[in-house]
Amino acid sequence: MTAFAAILGRDLRLAARTGGDALTLVLFFVMAAAIMPFAIGPDRPTLQKLAPGLIWIAAFLAMLLGLDRLFRADEEDGTLLLVRQATIPLEAVVAGKVIAHWLLTALPVLIASPILALLLSMDMAAWARTVLALLLGTPALTAFGTIGAAVTVSLRRGGLLAPVLIIPLAIPVLIFGAAASTAAAGSGAALLFLAAISLVSVAFCPFAAALALKVSSE
Amino acid sequence: MNPGDPLLSVENLALSRGGRALFAGLGFSLGPGGLLLLRGPNGAGKSSLLLALLGVLRPEAGTIDWHAEEPPKLHYVGHQAGVKTRLTLLENLRFWRDVNGETGIGAEAALEEVGLGAIGALDAGYLSAGQTRRLALARLLVTDRKVWLLDEPLAALDAEGALLAVRLIARRLETGGAVIAATHDDIAGMTETLMLGAAA
């Protein structure tokens, strides 16, 4: 447990020291969604209708942006090799890093979402539904992203490959996420599906990612 | 387990990297207090052998027997020190102490031991290559592990640092541990030398 807490704590502390990363991510998220009205046009009803989907796309892109950092630094300074001799299995190390990564990428996006709600003229209820859906859906995005990052960590220029690999996996998350963000009938079921996808993928991803890390270091 | 029993037996080991065979038919055993020096030209497979013992590389053939239910946890010092440049020396060491188990001496004491005691609160990014190597050696002290695998342990160290590394190795051997080191330097001790073949 000490080891697990140490992994989690170190990633959070490193992010706090390096500062800028989380802020850059939030700025990207806000700006990606803020430029969409310029492309769509300033028609308020249209924007209101599209707003949950726009926020989902922006959150998804922001999370892809941070993926490459997940294992890259640990791979380069040798930490990834050394944690394989830790008292906890590599799967647990990966789980700790996944939680830290969610806290550092998804949570800031959730906190910044009211700004977008204002920019896209969402009402309070629509914003609350979208945030709830994001809260339930982003763990799945992080989990898929972790697998993509683990598969590509040994590639020196793998930065863009991980997003390309995981976008197809993330489509169900976007479908149910967007459905759960609307007030239409069936949004409750979509929310449950979203939660199910997140639970399964988060439980599964440390094993898949650890396996990918082991294979890629051979 | 009796005191004289070997910790590790390797039989008929063959390794290849990138489709090129490094060596085959390698065998040795290592008991408590044993120091095995791996020698050979660059590219002979010294580092690869260490990685195979670490369980990272899968051997082409042969067995690596640790004489235990499952392979014990080892200490490894490689070319990359596993040091986070944005954390202080003490934070780096405490992290490894938490992750590897708090069975050795404290982080402050370990820093004193390797001669970095005065700068424990400094960011590790300000360290020179030799100081970073000393910090990597301090990691071996905060967790007590029987077998150390060292890849070029004396690289980048000054004369005093090399003496320090040799002293740490000697103490590990005296207390019933074993060390396998890939090196071009001479390390005194109950030394066995394993010559790996010339690079093709």
Image (cartoon, grey):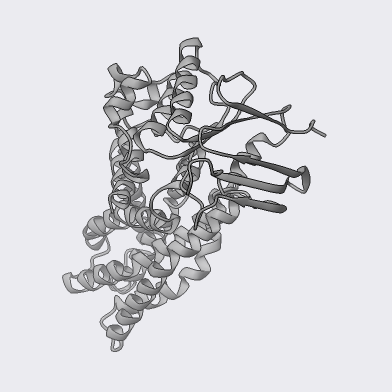
Closest to the observer, B129 or B10:
B10
Number of numbered markers: 0
Residue farthest toward the right in the current orientation of the protein: B200
On the picture, is A174 further left or further right than A217? left
Q: Nearer the viewer, residue B144 or B184?
A: B144
Q: Position of residue A76 (x, y in %)?
A: 51, 39
Task: State the residue at coordinates (59%, 43%).
Answer: B51
Q: Spot the residue most to the top.
A: B159
Residue B56 placed where, x, y %?
A: 58, 49
Q: Is residue B119 above or below residue A212?
A: above
Q: Residue at x 45, y 52 (%)?
A: A67
Corner quadrant of residue B118: top left
Q: Tell me if B189 is positioned left or right of A113 in this view.
A: right
What residue lies at 48% left-to-right and 15% top-to-bottom? Answer: B163
Give above or below for B114 relative to B103.
above
Residue A78 % position (x, y): 49, 39
On the image, the x and y values in percent for residue A87 come to 38, 50
- The relative height of residue A203 versus residue A153 in the rendered view (above or below) is below
Location of the N terminus of chain A (image quadrant): bottom left
